[in-house]
């Protein structure tokens, strides 16, 4: 009996050692980063790698004089130019066949901070993290930015990004002044009330109206928030949010919708950032935390089907764990991103975002349940995550996605790279887009071009004016990209 007990203890001990060994190995495997972008000689692609193209050359931008010279020569020689930042847009927005690609990431200086006016002037190749690091000592924070701080200022403005703040509109509305290198090679100072309305076309213009050299951004206080989380049914969310918007206690908000088979599109978690009335000028910017555990959970969820149940449960545990915690505004605007890296051969992960009027949300979700597979374990097309954000009506830009107050559903999708797999994903996303249009919605343009030209034109009714102004302001069509060539040109 003692021998059996000893063997049992020994087996348990050895088993524990194996488990610990496996955990240590997994923990120390570097998180592989996707290889894409501007470093691969003349063959250029973007985040998905779905649209590789050969360009003439890539220029790392150093100064305005060099940029101006390149643009003027392009007008004389019939050359095309594309503008690139971090290249997280996914539909060929940052390059064009045989073009000169301007890599703006080295054009990244902080030029001026005005503490009294609460503004910062910064070059377009700087990241939002660069801005945050510069303004923290002043107790200031950004008004609007994406949930992650890794993107460049010029890139975010070129797609007119929106964020978690529900008290300000889209990012374009926070720019007080801009210095622009126009398609004909002029350098212009542009303000909001500029009679030529350059901002209307540059912001949300995908690099087609020249080069943003620098911008002056409006800032706000680096408030301290208390985080409040709550579980809802999806049919409760519309009224919940309207009540939230009517009260002034909440500054920032987003939600996550379950795509797990056990609660598919029925369950949501909301995350609110509520005012405390206090500000902060000392707390450092947070580093990425819990990345490996989050990635392990997401990788399991990536298998689809009931594995998504596990991933949703881990999300619920995490969301519950941050309830009643405090954070600064700047730290609320810098979510982790490394855990999302995905490099599986033969597969790709892409984003799509669908905008639907706030008053249509409940009906839209109910219809969406009939379009998507509840259990995608055996499907090639898998939906891993849906995040909901509020996008206030945009009267400012020409290609505006928020024609009224909208909810934006940011969707993480995985599918295969075989021809039939891409065709299947395209068909599903086009059906999803048609459903969105039926509910008075739109879709976001920075992502891969699954949608038809007809769907683009129906979603963005200002496209003809956009095209007209493009040809008037860039008569030689110097600034080009694959997105423009496919949908507008």
Image (cartoon, rainbow, N blue to C red):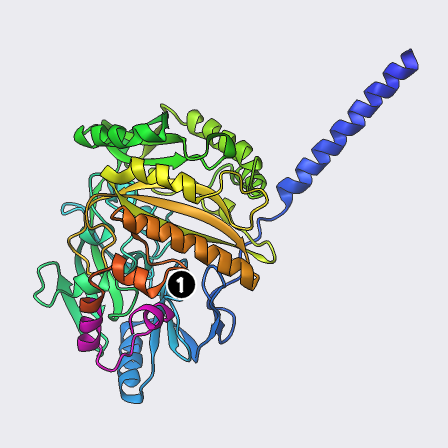
Q: Is residue 471 magenta?
A: yes
Q: In the rendering, at what x and y percent does residue 429 appear?
A: 41, 53
Q: Quadrant of the C terminus?
A: bottom left
Answer above or below: position of 392 versus 472.
above
Label 1 crowd bin: few (<14), some (14–19), many (20+), radius 10 Å = many
Answer above or below: position of 48 versus 128.
below
Q: In the rendering, at what x and y percent does residue 431 appear?
A: 39, 52
Give the residue drawn at x 35%, y 67%: 483
Element type at mark 1: loop
Residue 124 seen in render:
no
| In this rendering, position of residue 6 left or right of residue 257 | right
- Which residue reaches farthest bottom? 77
Give the residue drawn at x 24%, y 70%: 209
- Tell me which corner region of the image, top left, top right, bottom left or bottom right, holds residue 184: bottom left
| In this rendering, position of residue 217 left or right of residue 346 | left
Residue 272 seen in render:
yes
- Tell me which corner region of the image, top left, top right, bottom left or bottom right, holds residue 305: top right
Give the residue drawn at x 26%, y 28%: 240
Q: In the rendering, at what x and y percent does residue 325 appear?
A: 37, 26
| In this rendering, position of residue 154 left or right of residue 306 | left
Disc 1 marks which residue? 91
- Which residue reaches farthest top? 1
Q: Quadrant of the N terminus?
A: top right
Image mark count: 1
Q: In the rendering, at what x and y percent does residue 234 appear?
A: 35, 31
Answer above or below: position of 435 versus 286.
below
For this rendering, which residue is in front, 167 or 231? Answer: 231
For this rendering, which residue is in front, 388 or 381? Answer: 381
For this rendering, which residue is in front, 324 or 357? Answer: 357
User: Magenta stretch?
Assistant: 466-489
For this rendering, which residue is in front, 125 or 116? Answer: 125
Q: Is residue 335 magenta?
A: no
């Amino acid at each position: 009996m003692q021998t059996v007990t000893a063997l049992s203890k020994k087996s348990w001990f050895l088993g524990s050692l194996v488990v610990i060994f496996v955990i240590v190995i997994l923990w120390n495997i570097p998180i592989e980063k996707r290889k894409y972008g501007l470093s691969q000689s003349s063959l250029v692609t973007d985040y998905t790698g779905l649209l590789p193209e050969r360009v003439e050359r890539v220029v790392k931008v150093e100064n305005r004089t060099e940029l101006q010279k390149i643009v003027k020569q392009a007008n004389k020689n019939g050359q095309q130019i594309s503008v690139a930042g971090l290249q997280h847009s996914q539909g060929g927005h940052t390059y064009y066949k045989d073009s000169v690609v301007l890599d703006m990431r080295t054009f990244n200086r902080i030029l001026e901070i005005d503490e009294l006016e609460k503004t910062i002037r910064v070059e377009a190749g700087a990241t939002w993290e660069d801005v945050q690091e510069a303004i923290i000592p002043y107790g200031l924070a950004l008004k609007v930015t994406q949930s992650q701080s890794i993107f460049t200022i010029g890139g975010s403005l070129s797609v007119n990004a929106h964020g978690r703040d529900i008290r300000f509109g889209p990012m374009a509305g926070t720019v007080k002044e801009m210095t622009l290198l126009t398609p004909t090679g002029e350098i212009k100072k542009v303000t909001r009330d500029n009679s030529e309305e350059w901002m209307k076309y540059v912001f949300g213009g995908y690099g087609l109206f020249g080069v943003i050299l620098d911008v002056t951004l409006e800032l706000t206080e680096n408030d301290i928030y208390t985080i409040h989380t709550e579980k809802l049914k999806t049919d409760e969310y519309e009224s919940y949010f309207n009540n939230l918007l009517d009260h002034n206690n909440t500054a920032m908000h987003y939600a996550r919708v379950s795509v797990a088979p056990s609660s598919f599109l029925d369950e949501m978690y909301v995350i609110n950032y509520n005012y405390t009335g206090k500000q902060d000028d000392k707390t450092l910017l947070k580093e990425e935390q819990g990345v490996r555990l989050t990635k392990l959970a997401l990788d399991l969820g990536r298998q689809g089907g009931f594995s998504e149940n596990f991933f949703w449960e881990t999300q619920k545990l995490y969301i519950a764990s941050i309830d009643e915690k405090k954070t600064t505004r700047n730290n609320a605007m810098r979510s982790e991103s490394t855990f999302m890296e995905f490099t599986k051969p033969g597969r790709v992960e892409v984003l799509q975002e669908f905008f639907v009027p706030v008053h249509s949300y409940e009906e839209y979700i109910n219809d969406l349940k009939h379009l998507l597979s509840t259990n995608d374990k055996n499907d090639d097309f898998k939906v891993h995550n849906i995040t909901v954000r509020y996008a206030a009506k945009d009267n400012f830009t020409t290609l505006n996605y928020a024609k009224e107050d909208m909810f934006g559903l940011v969707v993480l999708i995985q599918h295969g790279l075989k021809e039939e797999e891409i065709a299947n994903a395209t068909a599903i996303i086009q059906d999803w887009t048609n459903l969105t249009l039926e509910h008075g919605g739109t879709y976001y343009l920075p992502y891969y071009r699954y949608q038809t030209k007809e769907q683009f034109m129906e979603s963005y009714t200002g496209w003809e004016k956009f095209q007209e102004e493009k040809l008037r302001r860039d008569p030689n069509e110097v600034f080009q990209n694959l997105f423009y060539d496919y949908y507008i040109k």
